Image: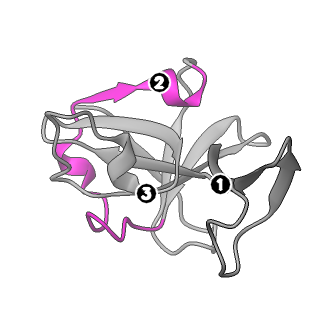
Amino acid sequence: MCICLSFFGNFYRKRPKSRIFAGIVIYIIGMYQKFIINQDGVLKFGHVYLHKDLLARDERCLYGGGLWKIDEGRRAILLYGRSFDFGAPDFHHLRRIEWTGVGGQPLPLFYLPHWPEEDLLIPVFAG
């Protein structure tokens, strides 16, 4: 979760949900469950506002990204959508999965090409 601080009188336009504490307004900006596939073919998960926030300083996202969610019923991670920053995911370039962004525990991965319909699930494997 991203927290932005503002002192009274600094902002005059409408803002997201806020809390007031000791003369400081704290704005809470929502984070989203997003993934990317970087230039090395590493799939990275995270809770970020923008897909580019998943990149380290020396990384680039050449193979797209999207959103993810854990499906408790299937005991799997569902990947869907696309990145507005980097485009749709290209899983043919996937070489490794970094599990730290989803709690460190590997789970089966499925891509939903026609989200929000969950009729077609395509298994995703690292090459």
**Residue positioned 29% across, 32% down in the render:** 126
Q: Dot 2 corresponds to which residue?
A: 99
User: Which three-letter amino acid code belongs to the residue tagged 3?
Assistant: Leu
Quarter of the image with the N terminus is top right
Q: Tag 1 or tag 2, which sits nearer the N-term?
A: 1
Give the alpha-carbon distance from disc 3 to disc 1, as whole Å: 21 Å
Q: Tell me where residue 25 appears, x and y as whole percent.
A: 76, 53
Q: Is residue 99 above or below residue 120?
A: above
Q: Which residue is mark 1?
A: 6
Q: Which residue is mark 3?
A: 50
The amino acid beneath tag 2 is Trp
Q: CA distance from mark 3 to mark 2?
A: 19 Å
- Judge left or right: residue 126 versus residue 77: left
Asked if labels 1 and 3 touch by Cβ distance under 8 angstroms, the answer is no
Location of residue 4 in the rendering, given as x and y in whole percent from the top left corner? 62, 50
**Place of residue 24 in the rendered image (x, y in percent of width and height, measured from the top left):** 76, 48
Q: Secondary structure at mark 2?
A: helix
Q: Residue at x 82, y 48 (%)?
A: 23
Image quadrant containing the C terminus: top left
Q: Nearer the viewer, residue 49 or 115?
A: 49
Q: Is residue 55 magenta?
A: no
Task: Name the amino acid type tagged 1.
Answer: Ser
Label 1 CA crowd tier, 10 Å (few <14, some 14–19, many 20+):
few
- Which sits earlier in the primary sequence, circle 3 or circle 1? 1
Residue numbers of the magenta segment: 81-103
Closer-to-camera residue (51/123): 51
Circle 1: element type: strand
Residue in the image at 13% along x and 41% along y: 39
Q: Closer to the N terminus: mark 3 or mark 2?
A: 3
